[in-house]
Image (spheres, helix red, strand yellow):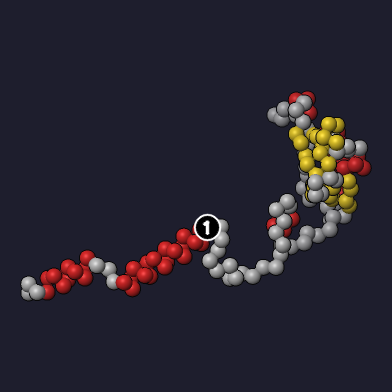
């Protein structure tokens, strides 16, 4: 009876090498999967190029073409970063709201440039599309930001 006791205690005190190797392998794989580089990156092959400047690759499906597409410059917008474009945005959204309600919707393209504006309301079935290089800046003029109650 006394001879069995050390054997039981020694097997509990020392885990087997196979168990230690398995635990270490699982831990290594999990810690590597948490990092930015995947250990097995070929699980889901992809051929798409990732463009860090735009989020256009986020949508996998092609949206239906809009019934009418217009540019902000059609409504008097100036993309110089100094001229207020609040009135141009509001005119554009007001004009395109009619087409947005109809089948197919509407899209307002904002060309390359820096567009200074205050608040304007968008509507359903309406796309505000910023072309590459287009930046919308919020105006510092408090009169262009009406209080909504």
For residue 17, say whether it is visible: yes
Q: Is residue 21 left or right of residue 69?
A: left
Is residue 119 in view? no
Query: Could you tell me which residue is drawn at 12 percent across and 70 percent down?
Result: 5
Q: Residue at x 81, y 49 (%)?
A: 131
Above or below 118: residue 48? below
Image location (x, y in percent) of residue 101: 83, 49
In which quadrant is the C terminus drawn?
Answer: top right
Q: In this view, does 33 lie above or below 148?
A: below
Q: How many marks?
A: 1
Give the quarter of the figure containing the N terminus: bottom left
Q: Nearer the viewer, residue 43 or 85?
A: 43
Residue drawn at x 64%, y 70% is: 45
Q: Quadrant of residue 44?
A: bottom right
Question: Where does the image place residue 99, in percent across and percent down from the top left?
Answer: 87, 49
Which residue in the structure is indicated by mark 1?
A: 35
Of residues 135 and 89, the one nearer the viewer is 135
Disc 1 element: loop
Q: Nearer the viewer, residue 76 or 115?
A: 115
Q: Position of residue 123 (x, y in %)?
A: 78, 44
Q: State the image coordinates of residue 56 (x, y, percent, origin top left).
A: 74, 55
Q: Is residue 136 above or below residue 49?
A: above
Residue at 13% over, 70% down: 6
Q: Quadrant of residue 10?
A: bottom left
Seen as rendered, the residue at the extreme left is 2
Q: Residues within 10 Å of mark 1 (few under 14, many from 20)?
A: few
């Amino acid at each position: 009876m006394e001879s069995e006791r050390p054997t039981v205690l020694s097997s509990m005190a020392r885990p087997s090498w196979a168990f230690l190797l398995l635990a270490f392998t699982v831990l290594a794989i999990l810690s590597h999967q948490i990092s930015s580089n995947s250990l097995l990156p070929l699980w889901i092959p992809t051929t798409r190029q990732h463009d860090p400047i735009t989020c256009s690759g986020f949508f996998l499906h092609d949206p239906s073409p809009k019934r009418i597409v217009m540019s902000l410059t059609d409504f008097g917008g100036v993309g110089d970063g100094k001229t207020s474009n609040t009135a141009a945005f509001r005119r554009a959204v007001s004009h395109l709201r009619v087409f947005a309600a109809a089948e197919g919707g509407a899209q307002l393209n904002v060309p390359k440039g820096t567009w200074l504006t205050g608040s304007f309301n968008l509507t359903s079935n309406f796309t505000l599309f910023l072309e590459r290089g287009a930046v919308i800046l919020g105006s510092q003029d408090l009169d262009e930001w009406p209080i909504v109650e």
